[in-house]
Image (tube, helix red, strand yellow):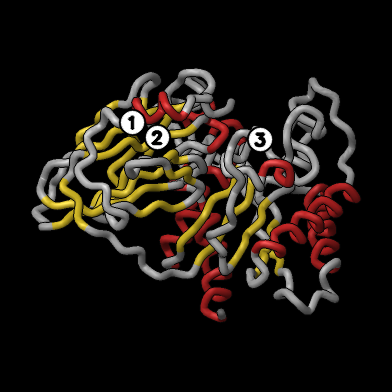
């Protein structure tokens, strides 16, 4: 699934019909993988990517549109005045206006719109707001980037609106409740999510890197696709820590129908090493942490850990960058859809990982 290829002129005409009360540069904050367009509109691309703004009064509506190569709905999560107020379903078609119910008597309010679904589920256009905007300033925080697969996306974690056996795969996403955003909020860090369901380091869940791009192929594209018409990722985030959780799909047996070769540790390790080298060229000061997976157990977990150790050992002589660290999750029996962690499981993962990352950030 790829972003609908809309000519810029049509896109301009589309979004220019939306009422936007202010166009000052300091009225919106954008975080995550986003594509900033004109007139304070933005495409929310990656999991938990967001747009935030402050406003006065008790009236606020936002205009959102689900965009993809095929028309379908999408989801965002809303946080008003620091409180999570749930998900919105953005139906297919033209931009839609969503009134936001204001319940507090505060003079100034803050609304943040998070993309609940991942990049591969299409994108959400934030096309403006009718709110009376005031200025907003980004708070200086330490930064973490989370690179991973469906677990990192928060995919198949939230059947609260639609049961696991109903609807589409993306109906059960909740990127806002994934372990990365959850622990980042706990320790007061900014975060960037670079994650794709089914993705691996040298092969994907059900593909031997023949038809689908692996993470090293997609990472440098802002939209996390192989589409050359999309902008390149600019590496402007510059994280203090880069957390990489890739391997669950490399070790997967696939769907049991499509040909699946035995796991190749040499390819996995080689691709991992080269991927880290690429990250270092753009983020030379970052502390890299590589993790196992709570979903990989038994003999595979032993091989997984050995591979991670060899990746780490490959950089032993590297005195230019911080030593690579390994974090190991405890094994987990997931309770979400399709064998994934649910929202409660994601919180368990966040609580395990948060002290480790907080300690690292405090040392910087």
Q: State if disc 2 and disc 3 touch (CB < 8 Å).
A: no
First reached walking from the N terminus: tag 2 or tag 1 = 1
In the drawing, does residue 351 fall left or right of residue 139?
A: right
**Label 1 environment density (alpha carbons within 10 Å; few <14, some 14–19, many ≥20):** many
Q: Is residue 343 visible?
A: no
| Mark-to-mark CA distance, 3 and 2 | 20 Å
Q: Which residue position is annotated with label 3?
A: 228
Query: Which-is-in-front pick, marks 3 and 2?
Result: 3
Residue 230: percent from left, percent from top: 59, 37
In the drawing, does residue 326 fall left or right of residue 5?
A: right
Q: Is residue 205 visible?
A: yes
Residue 15 — which label?
1
Name the residue located 66 percent from the left edge and 47 percent from the top edge.
Answer: 220
User: 1 and 129: which one is in front?
Assistant: 129
Residue 125 — which label?
2
Query: Which-is-in-front pick, marks 2 and 1?
Result: 1
Quarter of the image for residue 255 reads top right
User: 357 and 218: which one is in front?
Assistant: 218
């Amino acid at each position: 699934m790829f972003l609908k290829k809309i000519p810029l002129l049509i896109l301009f005409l589309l979004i220019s019909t939306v009422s936007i009360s202010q166009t000052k540069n300091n009225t919106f904050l954008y975080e995550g993988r986003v594509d900033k367009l004109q007139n304070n509109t933005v495409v929310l691309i990656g999991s938990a990517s967001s747009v935030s703004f402050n406003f006065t009064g008790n009236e606020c509506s936002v205009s959102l549109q689900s965009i993809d190569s095929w028309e379908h709905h999408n989801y965002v999560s809303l946080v008003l005045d620091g409180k999570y107020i749930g998900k919105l379903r953005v139906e297919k078609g033209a931009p839609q206006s969503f009134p936001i119910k204001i319940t507090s008597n505060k003079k100034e309010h803050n609304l943040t719109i998070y993309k609940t679904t991942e990049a591969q589920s299409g994108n959400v256009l934030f096309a403006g707001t009718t709110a009376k905007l005031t200025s907003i300033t980004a708070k200086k925080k330490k930064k973490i980037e989370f690179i991973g697969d469906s677990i990192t996306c928060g995919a198949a974690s939230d059947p609260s609106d639609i049961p696991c056996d109903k609807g589409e795969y993306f109906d059960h996403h909740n990127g806002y409740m994934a372990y990365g955003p959850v622990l980042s909020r706990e320790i007061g860090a900014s975060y960037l999510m670079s994650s794709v369901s089914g993705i691996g380091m040298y092969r994907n869940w059900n593909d031997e890197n023949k038809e689908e791009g692996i993470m090293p192929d997609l990472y440098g594209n802002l939209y996390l696709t192989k589409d050359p018409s999309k902008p390149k990722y600019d590496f402007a985030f510059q994280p203090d820590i880069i957390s990489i959780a890739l391997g669950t799909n490399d070790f997967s047996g696939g769907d049991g129908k499509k040909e699946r070769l035995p796991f190749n540790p040499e390819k996995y390790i080689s691709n991992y090493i080269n991927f880290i080298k690429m990250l270092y060229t753009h983020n030379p000061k970052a502390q890299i942490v590589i993790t196992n997976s709570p979903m990989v157990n038994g003999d595979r977990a032993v091989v997984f850990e050995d591979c991670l150790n060899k990746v780490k050992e490959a950089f032993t002589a590297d005195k230019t960058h911080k030593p690579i660290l390994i974090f190991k999750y405890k094994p987990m029996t997931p309770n979400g859809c399709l064998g994934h962690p649910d929202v409660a499981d994601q919180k368990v993962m966040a609580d395990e990982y948060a002290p480790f990352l907080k300690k690292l950030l405090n040392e910087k």
